[in-house]
């Protein structure tokens, strides 16, 4: 009886550790649908766009959610929404982040679909913070 209860306890601990390991790996290993991967690929695509360079300058800085205030601090949280598209059933990730150029600042919006190859976007938009003008990159 003692051996059986000890075996059951260790089996439960092992099962719990496996479940925890799965969820930790799922969060830490980047996939093409993770918000940070979408942010990275979108910022690279925007940085290489000639219209954006002309409007905002060559030295562009991208960052996550700005909490207001005057300190730059930790702006590394990328606002995102993950959902399933009702039309085609694909999983999608939508991100929003900020961009600072030498001439102006902007909001950037990007969306990727699980059905599309890595590096392609459903849309990639840049919206000027001052005027509200929207520029379509992809």
Image (spheres, grey):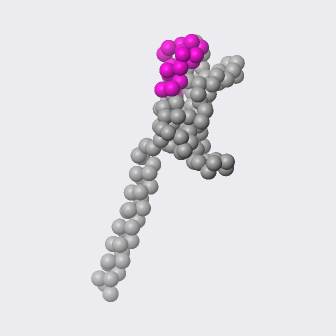
Look at the image and say whether residue 54 sits in the magenta stretch. Answer: yes
Q: Residue at x 45, y 48 (%)?
A: 27
Q: Is residue 36 visible?
A: no
Residue 79 image offset from top left, x and y in percent: 58, 38
Depth check: 76 or 58 in front? 58
Look at the image and say whether residue 26 sits in the magenta stretch. Answer: no
Depth check: 118 or 30 in front? 118
Residue 18 image offset from top left, x and y in percent: 38, 62
Whether residue 52 is situated above or below residue 23 in the rendered picture: above
Within the image, what quadrant is residue 12 found in? bottom left
Figure label count: 0
Whether residue 63 is situated above or below residue 84 in the rendered picture: above
Report the side of 114 relative to 136 (left or right).
left
Q: Quadrant for the N terminus, please.
A: bottom left
Residue 129 image offset from top left, x and y in percent: 65, 22
Whether residue 10 is situated above or below residue 31 in the rendered picture: below
Depth check: 69 or 128 in front? 128
Q: Quadrant for the C terminus, please.
A: top right
Magenta stretch, residue numbers: 44-63
Q: Residue at x 58, y 16 (%)?
A: 51
Q: Residue at x 70, y 22 (%)?
A: 132
Q: Residue at x 47, y 41 (%)?
A: 32
Whether residue 44 is situated above or below residue 91 in the rendered picture: above
Report the side of 112 relative to 7 (left or right).
right
Report the side of 55 relative to 3 (left or right).
right
Depth check: 16 or 56 in front? 56
Residue 128 image offset from top left, x and y in percent: 65, 21
């Amino acid at each position: 009886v003692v051996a059986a209860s000890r075996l059951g306890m260790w089996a439960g601990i092992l099962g719990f550790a496996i479940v925890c390991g799965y969820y930790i790996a799922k969060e830490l290993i980047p996939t093409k649908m993770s918000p940070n991967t979408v942010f990275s690929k979108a910022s690279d695509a925007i940085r290489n766009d000639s219209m954006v360079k002309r409007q905002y300058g060559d030295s562009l800085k991208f960052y996550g959610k700005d909490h207001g205030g005057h300190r730059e601090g930790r702006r590394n949280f990328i606002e995102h929404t993950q959902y399933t598209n009702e039309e085609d059933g694909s999983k999608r990730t939508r991100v929003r982040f900020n961009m600072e150029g030498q001439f102006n600042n902007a909001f950037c919006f990007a969306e990727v679909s699980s059905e599309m190859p890595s590096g392609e976007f459903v849309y990639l938009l840049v919206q000027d913070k001052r005027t509200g003008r929207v520029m379509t990159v992809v």
